[in-house]
Amino acid sequence: MSLLHVIILAIIQGMAELLPVSSSAHVIVAEKLMGMDPTAPAMTLLLVMLHTGTMFAVIAYFWKQWRKTYFRDARTFKTIVGQLFVASFVTAIIGYGLIEAIEKLILHGKHAQVEQLFGRLDLIAPALAVVGILILIAGLRHSREQAGSGALSSEDRADGSTGLNMNQAGWIGGIQGLCLPFRGFSRSGATISTGMLLGVTKARAEEFSFALAVILTPPAIAREVWRLMKAQHLAGAVPMASAMMPSLLGMVFAFLAGLVALKWLSRWLESGRWYWFGIYCLVAAVAVEYLRHIGY
């Protein structure tokens, strides 16, 4: 894997991370088009580290907004911490339980790992289609509600006046858990759409979804580092530091690309129609299925 490949993948990740279109699916398709194996331990680690880079970009960009929303008083902070804990706990139960079930009941094998499915376009295409339908439903409902009652004021969006309760947080966490084993089932698209369908404002659902991503990323990194170490031990491969260097470079480039994308896209996202992303995911599902059909 050359430096140019890393830069290309980092740019794709940075541009797609803010959008609910599954950045992982876009990176994996790009890897396959460049002749790489997305299921290899080094590549799955690279994918996670690209997410880490854009996670830091999200933190840097949204920090002032989060500080105003989540840290304005002790009660608000305690509430959001509780909601994030509940959502993350449900994610862990459902997500990692599902991963264990897939590895033991479907993949079998002594060294079976769910990452073996990450390069399968026949799974990515339907995952994109499912999340596309979910986004489309949430977006069309949101548009009808806005047309009927008028758009929320900026003050409503800022203080989350429509609320996010523990039950809604649990449902969002559960949907996030379903996203973990399947590339193409956009985590942000599914969680934000679920929040909207549960009556949470779009802006509030977006804030909560990005905050959940910050919590989810460290254990994902730990899993992929462990997977790479295990693979190198079995194969007697190159030292860990050399294997991780492309991933660390990718993280830096993804951070820079993510910042650029956030500045470019954030205002457009606020005024854009959510269901457009559902349509895009459905089109992308057809494109991925075509690539699978011709041999990728």
Image (cartoon, rainbow, N blue to C red):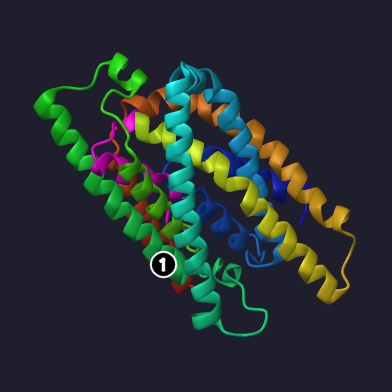
Q: Quadrant of residue 34?
A: bottom right
Image-based side of 130 in relation to 36, left or right = left
* Residue identified by numbered label 1: 289
Q: Quadrant of residue 19?
A: top left
Q: Point out the image quarter for the N terminus.
A: bottom right
Q: Which residue is nearer to you in this view: 122 or 131?
A: 131
Q: Is residue 117 visible?
A: yes
Is disc 1 surrounded by few (<14), some (14 to 19) or many (20+) residues within 10 Å?
some
Above or below residue 256? Residue 161 is above
Above or below residue 164? Residue 112 is below
Q: How many marks?
A: 1
Residue 2 location (% of width, % of height): 78, 52
Q: Which residue is pictured at 32% across the width and 25% down the height?
A: 271
Residue 281 location (% of width, % of height): 36, 52
Q: Which residue is nearer to you in this view: 186 or 38?
A: 186
**Is residue 166 rendered magenta in the image?**
no
Q: Which residues are magenta?
A: 183-203
Image-based side of 107 in relation to 148, left or right = right
Q: Which residue is pictured at 48% across the width and 34% down the height?
A: 81
Q: Amino acid at mark 1?
A: Glu
Residue 110 location (% of width, % of height): 66, 84
Q: Which residue is pictured at 69% across the width and 37% down the height?
A: 253
Q: Is residue 295 visible?
A: no
Q: Main secondary structure of the magenta part?
A: helix
Q: Secondary structure at mark 1?
A: helix
Q: Point out the image quarter for the C terminus.
A: bottom right
Residue 192 location (% of width, % of height): 36, 41
Above or below residue 119? Residue 179 is above
Q: Which residue is pictured at 47% across the width and 60% down the height?
A: 93
- Looking at the image, the residue that sits furthest to the bottom is 109
